[in-house]
Amino acid sequence: MVSAAALPASAQIDITGNYEPIMHEDQVERIPGPDVGDYAGLPITEAARFRANSWSPSLLTLPEHQCKPHPSTYGFRGVGNLRIQSVVDPESEEIVAYTTHIRWMEQKRTIWMDGRPHPPEFAPHTWQGFSTGRWEGNVLVVETTHLKAGWFRRNGLMLTDAAKMTERFIKHGNVIQHVYMIEDPNYLTEPLIKTSGFLLQDRDYMEPYPCSYVTEVPRARGEVPHNLPGTEASNPSAEYAAMHKIPVEAARGGAETAYPEFMRRAQPAAGRTGAQ
């Protein structure tokens, strides 16, 4: 009985193949990118807001930032085709792992299906983290730990290395729905949930994605783009709110800003401040 319990679970459905992202969800956020200062509806802490306000988009022009891969907490929301493959034990023919490969910056991850535990807390953290999976009916559930400090939106909203992620891969015909939930005790007050879709393609080849850095903006040695606290640039939500004529409190985010009750309270205040 003990030996049987240690065997990896067989796949319930075949999720392998090459997929193309379907951009009908949050297309503006995922392709051109979100506005700086737009934190509306996101359950961020004051610490996360403070850090995002100090972030400058020019940071991405630094050579050491130009070829960074997306962390797995954002990779499935970004651009780039997805390939899912299985790793099969040559003796038992059991699937012991799945690998995912997102073309942009060649993000590669292994999802272990053989029941192995996650490493101890002090083990190295990586962009993709350490992932284990299990089948719940026809749904592949994946848990990821040991993530490097990354991000979940491309406007300075970061995650710490204490973040954990739970994903669900749900296949409907030739479409995979990817649902992920991120928890971070430092930068999120409650779990953040996002969904994305992927369409199966009739091809096996994944083009390479080489990247090399260049000097985009000449700078003094050691200069790092940032916004100093207390300056006008460190309050981007005010500019975003004025541009879209919404209350500043809504643009600043927080779990409460995701609910209709918040907007009903905020609209009278917006009228008094001339922000409507």
Image: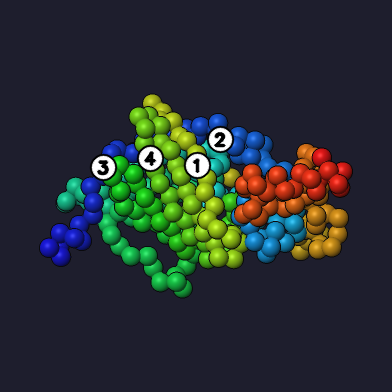
Q: Nearer the viewer, residue 157 or 120?
A: 157
Badge 1 crowding class, 10 Å Cα cut-off, few under 14, some 14 to 19, many 20 or more, is some
Taking 167 as reference, is 80 above or below it? above
Determine the residue positioned at 33% across, 65% down: 117
Label 1 close to label 3 by CB (< 8 Å)? no
SS label for mark 1: strand
Q: Amino acid at mark 2?
A: Glu
3D distance between C-alphas at marks 2 and 4? 16 Å
Label 1 close to label 2 by CB (< 8 Å)? yes
Q: Earlier in the sequence, mark 2 or mark 3?
A: 3
Determine the residue positioned at 52% across, 45% down: 194
Residue behind mark 1 = 195
**Where residue 170 is drawn, which disc sits there?**
4
Badge 3 crowding class, 10 Å Cα cut-off, few under 14, some 14 to 19, many 20 or more, is few
Q: Nearer the viewer, residue 247 or 39?
A: 247
SS label for mark 2: loop
